[in-house]
Amino acid sequence: MAMKDEPLAGWGRLPCVFASQARPTTRADLATAWAVTGRRISRGLGRSYGDAALPSGDGFALSSLGMAKMVSFDEASGILVAESGVSLAEIIEVFLPRGWFLPVVPGTKFVTLGGAVAADIHGKNHHVDGTFGVHVVWLELLLPRGGLLRCSEGQEAPVFRATIGGMGLTGHIERVAIRLRRVPSAWCKVRTIRGRDLDHTLELLATNDGSYRHTVAWMDCVAVGDRLGRGVVMLGNEATPEELPPKDAVTPHRLPPKAKLTVPFDLPEYALGPLTVGVFNACYYGLAKDDEKLVDFEKFFFPLDTIRDWNRIYGRRGFSQFQAYFPDATARDGLHACLAAIGRSRQASFLAVLKRSGPANDFPLSFLDLGYTLALDLPGPSKTLAPLMAELDGILAAYRGKVYFAKDAFVSPALVPAMYPRLEEFRRVQRALDPSGAVRSLLSTRLKLHD
């Protein structure tokens, strides 16, 4: 099968490599491409931010986008079977008008089903519904040595658990059975409250996570002093048809049309510098009102999806997303240290999100546990970010923090075993499936996730 050489990068465009990519469209094509000698890694829509879906060395990427069919749906159970190249956007487009929604969504719907499983994505409802992988019924995996394996909690459970959150390192996810969830409408009732500082923002999230299914806080990461950690907390529950205006109650599962914008070219670096970010953050916080209103799913869950190629606002320098988790016992001090370091660096962007997270699941490389997670974009280039990232590494080590592999491009490999204490359990499964180490990515090589 022909390979196409092309530049490949994650959503942060940092790093970028020139590598071969295969895009099979049939199971026969897939088997042929997968059998090519050399290192390989699966790739979807490229929305992981760093190097998770980039091939290592002279390896190649295997795209899932040519195999994107929805195979079956059981209306009684809500179980959808689909090929891994199907995007969450396509699932929402088909099933939300019928009253169904994905159980967990990240901040963008332009993620493939296979990518959602491999990164075990999480959303604003982690404290209630857990991660995406919790709702996977079974999956079919094309093994590194060839051959297809169906696995679930009741069949080949160690492989199933290692694959969810395993960043594509156990093989190519070909099909997934995911359980969708009924929703009363395509709208949320969202309560907005401003947090004065970090302590107040954390308190608002902690005291409300039992009353709201979806909670999130926008953070002002350039604020310092007694304003450090101030934010705008948004608390949401899905609205019933009776709570909607009459014009929307007629078709409660229909999303309102929205204008689509595009960033047509790479913006200059000064367009997103400390001054502009500071002004934006001050205005956003200052204009936020403590109120409650109806917000449609598109605006609430995927606010940036209406802006095509929004990553170009960072220019050619690219950016990295830093997402850290801290357990309850160290969250306040760990987050305070991170925010203080980022504030001093004057490198933070206006895209900063704090969420409350619930208990861990049973997948060895899954990211979250009970505590808090902070995610924000940091403009490149790499040499500029390196000192700040090294400082953040020290904070993570001091406060038992960990990073999310789907967002990382910098963390020291020396920290990974402490961040992910079940790493060796994952390695045992991965080693049995792929003793030659054929399936690997830049991320897995950089962080030494293999033996």
Image (cartoon, rainbow, N blue to C red):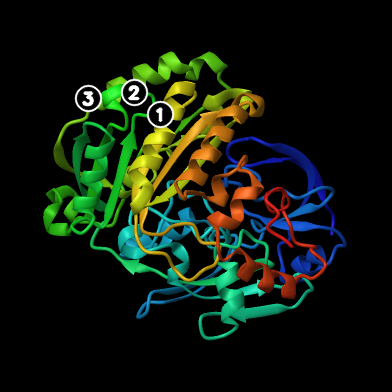
Residue 84 falls in which quadrant of the image?
bottom right
Q: Tell me the kind of residue under disc 2.
A: Val
Earlier in the chain: of badge 1 and badge 3, it is: 3
* Place of residue 124 in the rendered image (x, y in percent of width and height, measured from the top left): 34, 52
Kindly tell me whether residue 265 is visible in this rendering: no
Q: Residue furthest bottom?
A: 154
Label 1 element class: helix
Question: In percent of the image, x 55 and y 59: which residue is there?
Answer: 420
Q: Residues within 10 Å of mark 3 (few under 14, many from 20)?
A: few
Residue 102 falls in which quadrant of the image?
bottom left
* Place of residue 447 in the rendered image (x, y in percent of width and height, measured from the top left): 67, 50
Q: Tell me the kind of residue under disc 3.
A: Leu
Question: In percent of the image, x 44 and y 41: which residue is there?
Answer: 375
Residue 63 falls in which quadrant of the image?
bottom right
Earlier in the chain: of badge 2 and badge 1, it is: 2
Verify CB contact (< 8 Å) between mark 2 and mark 1: yes
Question: In percent of the image, x 65 and y 61: which residue is there?
Answer: 168
Label ID, residue 382: none
Label ID, residue 287: 3
Tell me if 35 is positioned left or right of 228 in this view: right
Label ID, residue 340: 1
Verify CB contact (< 8 Å) between mark 1 and mark 3: no
* Place of residue 61 in the rendered image (x, y in percent of width and height, measured from the top left): 74, 53
Kindly tell me whether residue 92 is visible in this rendering: yes
Q: In which quarter of the image is the C terminus?
A: bottom right
